[in-house]
């Protein structure tokens, strides 16, 4: 059984060739793309005295930025740098600068991704990225690097290293800019902003699977490193095997989560798809709980969805009962060394010596 889909992006964005509807929107896309470039170039970027590593993407929707940001923070910690995350806190009501306080702040306050980031390193909400970076620099606990979650197209803050993440299955869709396609700005412009690209491969097993042509295109048209990664479950997933499951997700690419559940041996008897960053309601929580009881199934979701569940009422009950599958991003040995080298080079830039 498949519930009615509540999605935030049209499926035709990811067709290999633009549809007639997409072509009709191209004039609007040109205006959108020109505005994005103009915003980036206007004004002078703040040059932070500590290295800023930006993790972004070319398209709207999920590609795996947050797992990569967490991986980079771990590498920075291993290298002796004290990282802090800087994010605009999409979906939250606080514009910042504001340090995320786990256990007190909610997804309604700061958004879902910052709550995940704050488990690993201090995380600051800053819709104004330059002001956010200044707040991190001014913090009593001195931080040796800033990991900027999203912001590839934001020119307010100079970066020591910019990495774009691409969904290996969906690529850049039809190659057009919003609203005709998924690109946030013209691809050539965005490529000029990136130092490296990480392709998040479609299969959690690390196998190639159904991959778009975009990774091969990148190798011929992008001068920087193109690295491959994939998501793997982190922790014990034996509870999934053979279990009837009601799986629900409101992330950028929910089908990635459902495929992971099935590859782990779970038997999805019902799946529910919500819009990315969806704010769950009491009614939806009651419906999901009822579905679990009706099927005699375990409810499962992503960590990103779980943090958006309130701790009271039906949502509190759902939060207590639902199982999550934590994930981590993994690169093969060669690309892991390349990424580590890029991170080390960004640190070597040193305080206040951004090019």
Image: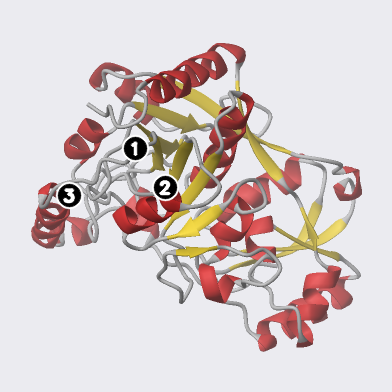
Whether residue 331 is visible: yes
- Placement of the C terminus among the 4 image quadrants: top left
Q: Nearer the viewer, mark 2 or mark 3?
A: 2
Mark 3–mark 1 distance (CA, rounded to whole Å): 21 Å
Residue 254, quarter of the rendered image: bottom right
Tags 2 and 3 touching, CB below 8 Å: no
The residue furthest front is: 140
The one nearer the camera, 136 or 217, is 136
Mark 2–mark 3 distance (CA, rounded to whole Å): 23 Å
The residue shown at (17%, 38%) is 189
Whether residue 60 is visible: no
The one nearer the camera, 300 or 124, is 124
Q: Secondary structure at mark 2?
A: helix
Does residue 5 lie above or below 42 as drawn? Answer: below
Q: Nearer the viewer, mark 3 or mark 1?
A: 1
| Residue 40: mark | 3
Q: Is residue 315 left or right of residue 249?
A: right
Q: Residues within 10 Å of mark 1 (few under 14, many from 20)?
A: some
Q: Residues within 10 Å of mark 3 (few under 14, many from 20)?
A: some
Mark 1–mark 2 distance (CA, rounded to whole Å): 8 Å
Q: Which residue is mark 2?
A: 137
| Residue 120: mark | none
Q: Which residue is mark 1?
A: 49
Q: Residue 71 location in percent, x, y?
A: 59, 34
Q: Residue 273 location in percent, x, y?
A: 59, 66
Q: Is residue 343 left or right of residue 34?
A: right
Q: Residues within 10 Å of mark 2 (few under 14, many from 20)?
A: some
């Amino acid at each position: 059984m498949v519930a009615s889909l509540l999605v935030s992006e049209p499926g035709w964005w990811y067709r290999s060739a633009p549809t007639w509807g997409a072509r009709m929107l191209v004039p609007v896309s040109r205006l959108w793309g020109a505005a994005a470039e103009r915003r980036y170039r206007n004004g002078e970027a703040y040059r932070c005295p500590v290295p800023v590593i930006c993790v972004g993407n070319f398209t709207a929707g999920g590609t795996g930025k947050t797992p990569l940001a967490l991986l980079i923070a771990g590498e920075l910690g291993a290298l002796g740098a004290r990282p802090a995350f800087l994010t605009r806190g999409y979906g939250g009501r606080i514009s910042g600068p504001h340090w995320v306080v786990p256990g007190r702040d909610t997804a309604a306050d700061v958004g879902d991704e910052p709550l995940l980031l704050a488990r690993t390193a201090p995380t600051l909400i800053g819709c104004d990225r330059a002001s956010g970076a200044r707040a991190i620099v001014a913090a009593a606990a001195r931080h040796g690097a800033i990991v900027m979650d999203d912001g590839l197209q934001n020119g307010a803050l100079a970066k020591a290293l910019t990495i774009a993440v691409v969904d290996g299955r969906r690529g850049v869709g039809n190659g057009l800019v919003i609203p005709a396609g998924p690109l946030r700005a013209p691809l050539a412009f965005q490529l000029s902003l990136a130092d490296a690209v990480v392709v998040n491969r479609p299969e959690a097993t690390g196998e190639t699977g159904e991959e778009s042509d975009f990774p091969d295109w990148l190798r011929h048209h992008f001068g920087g490193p193109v690295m491959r990664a994939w998501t793997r479950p982190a922790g014990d997933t034996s509870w999934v095997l053979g279990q009837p499951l009601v799986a629900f997700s409101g992330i950028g690419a929910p089908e990635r989560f459902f495929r992971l559940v099935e590859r782990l041996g779970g038997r999805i008897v019902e799946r529910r798809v919500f819009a990315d960053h969806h704010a769950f309601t009491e009614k939806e929580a009651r419906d999901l709980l009822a579905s679990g009881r009706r099927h005699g199934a375990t409810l499962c979701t992503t960590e990103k969805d779980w943090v958006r569940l309130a701790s009271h009422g039906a949502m509190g009950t759902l939060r207590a009962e639902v199982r999550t599958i934590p994930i981590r991003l993994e690169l093969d040995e060669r690309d892991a060394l390349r990424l580590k080298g890029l991170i080390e080079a960004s640190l070597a830039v040193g305080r206040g010596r951004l090019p």
